[in-house]
Amino acid sequence: MSPLPPQVLSPLDGRYYPAVRELGEHLSEAGLNRARVHVEVEWLIFLTDRELFGSATLPAEAQADLRRLVSDFGQAEIDELASLEATTRHDVKAVEYLVRRRLTALGLDGIAELTHFACTSEDINNLSYALIVESAVRDVWLPKARTVVEALRARAVEFRSDAMLSRTHGQPATPTTLGKELAVFVHRLERILAAVDSTEVLGKFSGATGTFAAHVAADADVDWPALSREFVSSLGLTWNPLTTQIESHDWQAELYGRIAHANRVLHNLCTDVWTYISLGYFRQIPQAGATGSSTMPHKINPIRFENAEANLELSSALLDSLAGTLVTSRLQRDLTDSTSQRNIGVAFGHSLLALDNIARGLTEIDVDRALLAADLDGNWEILGEAIQTVIRAEIVAGRSSIADPYAVLKELTRGKRISGEDLREFVSGLDIGSDAKRRLLELTPAGYAGLASDLVAHIER
């Protein structure tokens, strides 16, 4: 790989390029232009297959030659398009001229006028963006997101029985297990990724204002909407029958909203893991040669999760802006979407970079079971919930005459630290049945995690 120019503005194209380079195959300018050539070539073949306007079905070899314009699309085509656009000042027109040149080189001048036939630029662009966004999600973003989910799943199962003090409102609370808390994120993310995967990707192909006016002028006897539907569907997209000059981009807004939602759940994961590291519940595994601080040699900083947080915020901000901007176009067309859509790759890039950091970060932490146990043993007052709940059950069963058990436990525990010995002494003097008293005397903070370990089964495979 040739070195990147030092003047690049985006860190995605510089410092972080190795983590996001795969997206460039789809969402770069070159990826977009390759998709444009693909749509132009397929439309040309589609028209000749139906022998419209006296054309003849192209021989298989000629069709293969045309499709090689797409499969062999490379630096020569990128440079040629740049040269053409310098004259045309129009990116899609440059693509049309490129295809026409190739038709001449292949001896197919006779069908040159079917290139870009009855198309507005947005007919080509909307299908091209649909193709590159769909492939970027399917081939790059979703696989990376699923890698993170699988890593979380493995850690959730591994830590399913590791009892941990909860911190509701940042204060000691009813214990859980570390595995169950990670399983919550697995469950949340799986639902969102399923929604991302099910997003319906739409395409239009109906001319300058979505009316097929030029098509009908050329041949009023052709069922152009049916052909349009067939062509869009042949590209693997869902046909949108009612549009202005542009496809309305609602599917993009839906998709970007779902990915932004995934980003925010991942952000929540990062802040929780960061906090667990801060509390010492997770210890960080030293990486050979790494430096945490330029002055404090002992430091291991949770940089993977901090980096991910920032990039998730940037990605979500861009995705929110795209979703909000793209659904509005003045009357039949304006160009606000044109410049906005050029930033789709940036929005996806920051999310992909975050996913890469999270995946790596999850391999660099391990649980400190001794600290988890010590933290639980230092907070016996959390059993106040269990005690007052058991007393309530005993009152209902007629085995206790204690008045207002909640108030009794509040007086004993609120804002106080009490020892296991203090709590056992208190329980021993309670007016409750012997079985209930025995169960409470045997209870410890570490044993008060309920069904947390069992709940992890919901995300097991």
Image: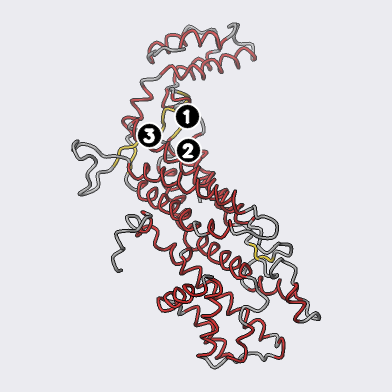
- Circle 3/circle 2 CB separation < 8 Å: no
Dot 1 falls on a residue whose secondary structure is loop
Which residue: 29% across, 68% down?
2
- The vertical placement of 348 against 81, above or below, is above
Q: CA distance from mark 3 to mark 2?
A: 14 Å
- Considering only order in the chain, which callout, 3 or 1, is on the residue closer to the N terminus? 3
- Between label 3 and label 2, give the one nearer the viewer: 3
- The circle drawn on residue 180 is 2
Q: In the image, 376: left or right of 284? A: right
Report the number of discs. 3
| Image quadrant in which the N terminus is located | bottom left
Dot 3 falls on a residue whose secondary structure is helix
- Between label 2 and label 1, give the one nearer the viewer: 2
Q: CA distance from mark 2 to mark 1?
A: 10 Å
Q: Which residue is mark 1?
A: 449
Label 3 crowding class (10 Å Cα cut-off): few <14, some 14-19, many 20+? some
**In-front residue for pair 37/415:** 37
